[in-house]
Image: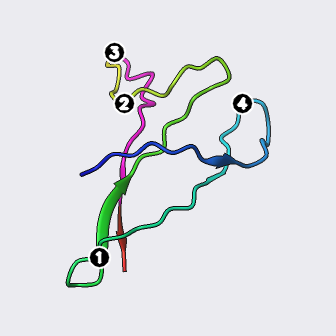
Amino acid sequence: MERLRRSATLGQPVSPVSWREFTLKMLIIGAGSSGEVKTEILARATDATGTTQPLEQRHNALGYMNNQARPVRVRIV
């Protein structure tokens, strides 16, 4: 699967430490004979200091810091 990196448009912050809505327009090409496309989308955050959300979990005894970016499978029909 080809991996592309795109920057999304951020919505207004609710507070300095809250999650933010984001939007990204995509053109999906290549529906199979069934007329559908299956793919994965991964949203990965970067803060004001340039620290990027990890792709893998940093394991520890109490389970803290479980904040890695996780892909979401989508089916477009």
Which region shows up in magenta?
Answer: 62-73
Tell me the mark number nearer the camera, choosing from 4 and 1: 1
Type of amino acid under label 1: Ala
Disc 2 and disc 4: Cα gap in Å? 21 Å
Residue at the image point whose x is 50% and y is 62% from the top: 26
Discs 3, 1 touching: Cβ within 8 Å:
no
Q: In x, y percent, where is residue 50?
A: 59, 20
Mark 2: few, some, or many residues within 10 Å (few <14, many ≥20)?
few
Query: What's the CA distance linking mark 4 and mark 1?
Result: 39 Å
In which quadrant is the C terminus drawn? bottom left
Q: Main secondary structure of the magenta part?
A: loop
- Residue, x 41% and y 32% (percent of image)? 68
* Tag shown at residue 31: 1
Which residue is labeled 2 in the image? 55
Structural crowding at the residue carrying mark 1, measured as other residues with C-alpha within 10 Å and reported as few (<14), some (14–19) or many (≥20): few
* Alpha-carbon span between mark 2 and mark 3: 16 Å
Q: Is residue 1 magenta?
A: no
Amino acid under disc 4:
Val
Establish if 46 lies above or below 41: above
Q: Which residue is mark 3?
A: 60
Comparing marks 3 and 1, which lies closer to the viewer?
1
Mark 3 neighbour class, 10 Å CA radius: few under 14, some 14 to 19, many 20 or more: few
The picture places residue 54, in percent across and down from the top left corner, at 42, 26
Q: What amino acid is labelled 3 in the image?
A: Asn
| Circle on res. 17 | 4
